[in-house]
Image (cartoon, grey):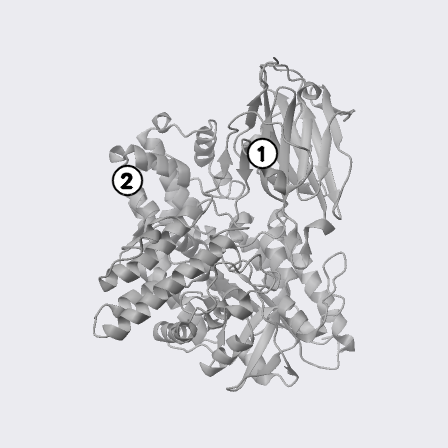
């Protein structure tokens, strides 16, 4: 080893969590089952290839319960129940559900792998509305089989030869085939707990946990201190009275992991990396030895700015590479803080490039950090790479396996790097730093505003508070009721973070109404289980405006071009398309929503740009928006779009040709003049004069394009779609499946 290079320890820490989707014995969503066969097992089995590698995993107890429900208790989700059913007996409602939900797979990395699945996808989205009569019983059977197969990690096809045989079949699937696919999935899920036990016992992994139902502890403990920098506190209870529940969530979480795995966790991953002084006091009191948070929380705690260069490398990583000790009222607790940049790269960037190049880039960033340690006064340093373990890998080819094997190999073959179990490192560390204060915050924007302080979120907290008060009052008078613990479980589930994440702004799952339904059902169940009437308001949705992902224009519009979101009344009758969020917040998502409409002279667009949060700034990037149009009423010369794709598996919409391209460029919050190009000859673009096109940017980007500029005559239809990019490299296509269209009304 080069004596000038100080060894760098790496804490690679993967977090696993899903909301409680179960209601009345059925899971309303399939994500526990699908991530179990795609992520949870192979992420630990990879240790077989790397004998020196050590990893850290966090599993939320509620997720562990769900895994056991599938394997030990015979539970199904709606999707798996349909998968094993006879397609000849499907109702129209079930067929519509299948067409709307069994394409929930990443096109470039999952659907594209199967020629038949791809053909079914193209058939489904050849029309705006699913026509169930266009699909045969056999096609429904194939669709359900292929959906479940593409969600299985490729490594399991090597481990289960029958699974490979079923994959190679590709069409003509029988009901027995589909039953067999689900049975094999359950076999894979049954392997998860024994695999983790094995690697715990051999000292290859450390397992930690979170509060049982993934509650935001600082909010439960002290709601007042959680509301700084939020939109509004109107409607929010001044106190939740849930300190005891927070204690219970922590202790019962530790108990559950110890019960199943035989080892009591030393560390705890606070949900959403949310910490504060009172949270640390409670964690220490419950016996937690160490916990973790984000670099933003550390920055505010020590009044230090973590400055990065244009490549994202820290100028001074020293403070981020230390273990901190914090003195609580009870005892000392240790804290590590993760590097934020690396998880963002893993979740959002590396999937789009060659896996070896991505691994090489990450390795180079690790070495850049290590090379800056020469001036450090200490000999030991810990780089914490802590990230979600579930929701990014479907964006990678081969489910991220190639990327992980490449980066693990590079680390293992570098004698100046070592992977460590966090508790082992903390126990041996002789260079801990004392943390005098802890800033209250989360990993997003260093605040709690994604779970509290917005009208819908506040109403949800008020409903939860009222249910909690009614429960407590009932128990005081009826402590002998045998159903009290069962009712309390419903209340604890409702304290989970996910319900509040999806209420209100800014996140949109596309199924917010399902999360709203599940939250209210949990609260209603508290009353029902206790045998008392529940408040009637729990029958009504909390969602003030149920925003559908897509809406056609209601009628013509002529909106003001002022770029001000407050003029949204002008856009009331417009069409709209929302960019849905996944479970992982997309800080690099350029557009949240577009509105579109027209009158007899012009076509209008409004782009709701996502300016990001925290240190990941939208306005610091080169953000480009492209609007592609063509005349659907008559065919002229057309050309393919010219954007650079990150993958060689293009969406079908990219095979279409267009006549005009309008490019908008936004750099450092400055909108540059538009660039219009038109087709000169087939497959040849040329610059056109953008005169007459209006663009305005304040809160949003407003765009007005004369129909005449696009060659659209009265009575003719324009088809269009949008793309947003970073420096010309495709980020998102809007929409991904079909072209949008509007018809120019005849003049009066």
Q: Residue 104 location, x and y as percent?
A: 45, 43
The residue where tag 2 is placed is: 175
Rendered residue at 48%/41% (across/down):
547
Residue 13 in the figure: left or right of residue 38:
right
Q: Looking at the rendering, in which quadrant would you find the C terminus?
A: top right
Q: Is label 1 or label 2 in front?
A: 1
Q: Looking at the rendering, in which quadrant would you find the N terminus?
A: bottom right
Residue 104 in the figure: left or right of residue 602:
left
First of labels 1, 2 by sequence position: 2
Circle 2 packing at 10 Å, graded few (<14), some (14-19), many (20+), is some
Q: Residue 658 location, x and y as percent?
A: 64, 24
Rendered residue at 30%/62% (across/down):
526
The residue where tag 1 is placed is: 571
Label 2: element kind: helix
Residue 396 vertical position relative to residue 451 in the rendered view, above or below: above
Circle 1 packing at 10 Å, graded few (<14), some (14-19), many (20+), is many
Residue 579 visible at all: yes
Q: Distance between the Cα atoms at labels 1 and 2?
A: 48 Å
Q: Observer-nearest residue: 324 or 388?
A: 324
Residue 151 vertical position relative to residue 293 in the rendered view, above or below: above
- Pointer 1 and pointer 2: residues touching (CB < 8 Å)? no
């Amino acid at each position: 080893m080069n004596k000038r290079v100080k060894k760098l320890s790496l804490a690679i820490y993967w977090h696993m969590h899903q909301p409680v989707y179960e209601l009345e014995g059925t899971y309303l969503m399939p994500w526990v089952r699908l991530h179990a066969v795609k992520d949870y097992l192979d992420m630990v089995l990879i240790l077989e290839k790397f004998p020196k590698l050590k990893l850290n995993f966090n599993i939320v107890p509620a997720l562990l319960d769900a895994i056991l429900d599938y394997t030990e208790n015979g539970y199904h989700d709606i999707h798996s129940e349909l998968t094993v059913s006879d397609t000849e007996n499907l109702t129209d409602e079930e067929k519509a559900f299948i067409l709307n939900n069994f394409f929930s797979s990443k096109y470039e990395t999952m659907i594209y792998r199967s020629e038949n699945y791809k053909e079914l996808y193209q058939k489904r989205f050849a029309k705006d509305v699913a026509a169930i009569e266009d699909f045969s019983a056999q096609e429904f059977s194939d669709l359900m089989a292929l959906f479940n197969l593409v969600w299985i990690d490729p490594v399991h096809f090597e481990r289960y030869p029958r699974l490979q045989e079923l994959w190679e079949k590709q069409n003509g699937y029988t009901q027995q085939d589909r039953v067999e696919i689900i049975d094999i999935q359950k076999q894979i899920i049954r392997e998860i707990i024994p695999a983790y036990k094995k690697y715990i016992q051999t000292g290859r992994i450390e397992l930690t946990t979170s509060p049982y139902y993934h509650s935001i502890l600082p909010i439960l403990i002290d709601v007042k201190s959680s509301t700084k920098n939020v939109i509004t506190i109107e409607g929010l209870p001044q106190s939740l009275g849930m300190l005891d529940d927070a204690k219970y969530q922590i202790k019962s979480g530790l108990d559950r992991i110890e019960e199943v795995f035989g080892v009591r966790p030393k560390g705890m991953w606070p949900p959403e990396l949310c910490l504060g002084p009172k949270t640390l006091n409670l964690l220490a009191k419950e016996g937690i030895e160490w916990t973790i948070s984000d670099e933003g929380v550390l920055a505010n705690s020590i009044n230090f700015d973590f400055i990065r260069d244009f490549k994202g490398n820290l100028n001074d990583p020293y403070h981020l590479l230390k273990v901190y000790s914090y003195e609580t009222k009870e005892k000392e607790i240790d804290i590590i803080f993760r590097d934020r940049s690396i998880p963002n790269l893993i979740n959002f960037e590396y999937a789009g490039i060659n896996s070896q190049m991505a691994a090489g880039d990450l390795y180079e960033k690790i070495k850049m950090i290590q090379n800056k340690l020469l001036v450090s006064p200490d000999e030991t340093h810990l780089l914490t790479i802590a990230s979600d373990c579930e929701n990014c890998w479907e964006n990678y080819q081969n489910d991220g396996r190639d990327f992980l094997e490449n980066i693990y190999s590079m680390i293992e073959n570098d004698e100046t790097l070592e992977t460590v179990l966090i508790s082992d490192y903390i126990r041996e560390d002789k260079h801990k730093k004392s943390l005098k204060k802890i800033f209250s915050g989360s990993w997003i924007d260093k605040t709690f505003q994604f779970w509290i302080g917005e009208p819908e979120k506040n109403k949800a907290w008020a409903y939860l508070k009222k249910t909690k008060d009614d429960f407590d009052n009932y128990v005081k008078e009826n402590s002998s009721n045998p159903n009290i613990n069962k009712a309390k479980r419903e209340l604890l589930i409702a304290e989970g973070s996910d319900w509040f994440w999806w209420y209100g702004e800014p996140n949109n799952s596309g199924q917010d109404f399902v999360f709203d339904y599940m939250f209210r059902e949990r609260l209603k169940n508290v009353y029902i289980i206790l045998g008392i009437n529940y408040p009637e308001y729990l029958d009504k949705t909390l969602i003030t405006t149920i925003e559908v992902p897509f809406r056609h224009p209601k009628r013509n519009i002529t909106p003001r071009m002022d770029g001000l979101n407050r003029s949204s009344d002008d856009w009331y009758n417009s069409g709209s398309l929302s960019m849905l969020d996944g479970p992982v917040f997309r800080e690099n998502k350029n557009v949240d929503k577009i509105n579109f409409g027209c009158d007899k002279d012009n076509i209008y667009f409004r782009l709701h740009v996502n300016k990001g949060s925290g240190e990941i700034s939208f306005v610091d990037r080169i953000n480009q928006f492209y609007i592609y149009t063509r005349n659907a009423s008559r065919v002229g010369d057309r050309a393919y779009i010219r954007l650079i794709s990150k993958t060689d598996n293009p969406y079908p919409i990219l095979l279409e040709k267009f006549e005009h391209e309008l490019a908008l460029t936004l750099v450092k919050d400055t909108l540059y003049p538009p660039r219009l190009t038109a087709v000169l000859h087939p497959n040849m673009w040329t610059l056109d004069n953008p005169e007459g096109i209006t663009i305005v940017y304040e809160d949003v980007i407003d765009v007005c394009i004369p129909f005449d500029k696009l060659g659209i005559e009265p009575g003719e239809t324009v088809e269009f779609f949008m793309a947003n990019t970073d420096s010309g490299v495709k980020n998102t296509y809007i929409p991904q499946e079909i072209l949008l269209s509007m018809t120019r009304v005849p003049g009066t």
